[in-house]
């Protein structure tokens, strides 16, 4: 057996000690909820959390983030817990990261690094992988970190294991700049192809809705419930990365298009937004944004606000928005929260697991779709069977009445279908038809 073959390709998860600070205006309870989130992120990143240290920190220390006293305490905890990595639930500057690594004699990752690591492991499509790699490089670019191993890895991520020495750093920097340029070029070309495909898709005359929301809110569970799709829905953060699109047939027989995409998170690294902007913007081109909120999470209000802020950053905050308060099955039926949320404008209470409220959701989709739809009254000769078939396929037949020579129709069309069919249906609009009938009676 060669030496290469004996190398363990699936090493044990690194033991990660978590650090959560409590800022001056924060309560211990809030910090504990933040700590739960970083713990789940750490697990999603394939690490093994071995405990959390809390530090009340009225002011961040620019050199070591924590200040000397706290740092000594943390260094002792690293030894005690046999931690191989310390994860800060905050953004660290490159200098802070380096000083912490020296002071703790252990690798240090920040919140952005962990999120990038998860994205790197999850990205499936070529575009997704390029975007994650670009995000990771943009993050690395400013960092003189010895931990950096990016170019040695197949996938993105920031490299939590091993890394080249300091002498390597200048070379790395040049390599990073070159690689960033290369990636940007590749992404532009992938995105150009996709724009062409999208144009073709935009011709599809259906109303479209996009699910958005905080990670783990239940978007994919709802998507699967509504479409019968098999998108990975799991109790882990950032289960979904690449967008999926499906058609759904509503009870009123309208067809709409629904998409599921990556979840958002508080303090989403801006490198990720930058790298994913093209994909996100495309998904968010929908007619309606459907914001899924996990109301069983004590932090739901903050999460809702974080999503709205991200939508703002993506310049889609002025789109029609429907809010779904999800996971209501986890709240007691007489909960004050449910009563409070009931009847809020443009919101629905649902459960994607039990299906509670889904009938109202589908009815709302129908109403929203018909808001943008155009009603046309037509009178087509009975000989125009092909046109009749096309109208039934691309629109919804509301009313039909046949006489000897003509079929009188009321058809609902989406704006796009209306635009496309206009040249064909123009001669048969009700006014044109009245004229034809009058002319006929006169002869
Ligand atoms: N009890 C309950 N659990 C739910 C409900 N909706 C989703 N879940 C659970 O919540 C977890 C996350 O669901 P996902 O559908 O993966 O969430 P997501 O919003 O797609 O998450 P990301 O893809 O990570 O952004 C899963 O364990 C689901 O089973 C619900 O209405 N009730
Ligand atoms: Mg998902």
Image: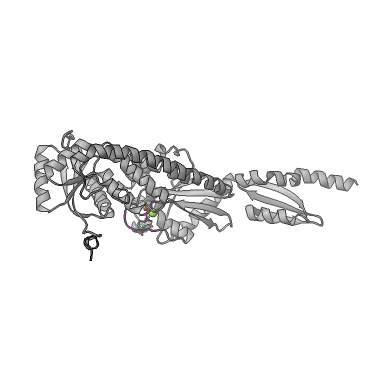
Task: Tell me, yes or no, if residue 309 can be seen here.
Answer: no
Of residue 407 and residue 185, the one placed in the foreground of this image is 185
Locate residue 10: give its quadrant.
bottom left
- Whether residue 57 sits left or right of residue 133 in the image: it is left
The chosen color scheme is: one colour
Residue at coordinates 35% horizontally, 46% vertically from top-left?
A: 132
- Report the quarter where the N terminus lies: bottom left
- Whether residue 290 sits left or right of residue 306 in the image: it is right
**Residue lying farthest to the right in this orientation:** 443
Residue at coordinates 39% horizontally, 58% vertically from top-left?
A: 232
- Whether residue 284 sits left or right of residue 77 in the image: it is right
* Percent x, y of residue 118: 31, 51
Of residue 333 and residue 318, the one placed in the foreground of this image is 318
Q: Specify start and end residues of the magenta stretch as a single range.
A: 232-241
Judged by its main secondary structure, the magenta piece is loop
* Percent x, y of residue 42: 25, 52
**Residue lying farthest to the front in this orientation:** 2
* Percent x, y of residue 262: 39, 49
* Percent x, y of residue 343: 44, 48
């Amino acid at each position: 057996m060669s030496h290469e073959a004996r190398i363990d390709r699936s090493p044990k998860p690194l033991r990660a000690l978590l650090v959560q600070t409590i800022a001056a205006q924060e309560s211990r309870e809030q910090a504990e909820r933040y700590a739960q989130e970083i713990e789940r992120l750490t697990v999603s990143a394939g690490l093994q959390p071995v405990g959390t240290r809390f530090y009340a920190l009225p002011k961040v220390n620019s050199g070591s983030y924590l200040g000397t006293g706290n740092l000594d305490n943390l260094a002792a905890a690293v030894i005690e817990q046999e931690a191989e990595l310390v994860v800060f639930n905050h953004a660290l500057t490159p200098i802070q990261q380096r000083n912490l690594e020296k002071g703790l004699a252990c690798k240090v990752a920040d919140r952005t690094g962990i999120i990038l690591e998860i994205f790197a492991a999850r990205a499936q499509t070529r575009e997704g992988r390029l975007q994650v790699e670009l995000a990771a490089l943009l993050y690395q670019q400013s960092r003189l970190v010895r931990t950096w191993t990016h170019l040695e890895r197949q996938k993105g991520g920031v490299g939590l294991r091993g890394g080249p020495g300091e002498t390597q750093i200048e070379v790395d920097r040049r390599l990073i700049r070159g690689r960033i340029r290369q990636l940007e070029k590749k992404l532009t070309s992938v995105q150009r192809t996709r724009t062409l495909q999208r144009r073709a898709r935009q011709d599809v005359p259906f109303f479209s809705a996009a699910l958005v929301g905080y990670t783990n809110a239940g978007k994919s569970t709802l998507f699967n419930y509504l479409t019968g799709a098999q998108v990975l829905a799991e109790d882990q953060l950032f289960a979904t990365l690449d967008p999926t699109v499906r058609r759904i047939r509503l009870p009123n027989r309208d067809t709409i298009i629904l998409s599921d995409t990556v979840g958002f998170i508080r303090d989403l690294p801006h490198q990720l937004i930058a790298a994913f902007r093209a994909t996100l913007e495309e998904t968010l081109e929908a007619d309606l944004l459907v914001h899924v909120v996990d109301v069983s999470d004590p932090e739901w209000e903050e999460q809702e606000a974080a999503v709205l802020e991200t939508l703002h950053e993506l310049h889609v905050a002025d789109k029609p928005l429907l809010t779904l308060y999800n996971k209501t099955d986890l709240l007691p039926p007489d909960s004050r929260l449910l009563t409070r949320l009931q009847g809020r404008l443009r919101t629905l209470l649902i459960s994607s697991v039990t299906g509670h409220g889904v009938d109202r959701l589908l009815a709302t989709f129908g109403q929203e779709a018909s808001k943008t739809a155009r009603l046309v009254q037509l009178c087509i000769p009975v000989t125009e069977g092909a046109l009749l078939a096309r109208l039934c396929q691309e629109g919804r037949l509301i009313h039909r009445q046949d006489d000897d020579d003509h079929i009188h129709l009321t058809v609902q069309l989406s704006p796009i279908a209306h635009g496309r069919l206009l040249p064909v249906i123009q001669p048969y609009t009700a006014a044109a038809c009245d004229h034809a009938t009058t002319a006929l009676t006169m002869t």
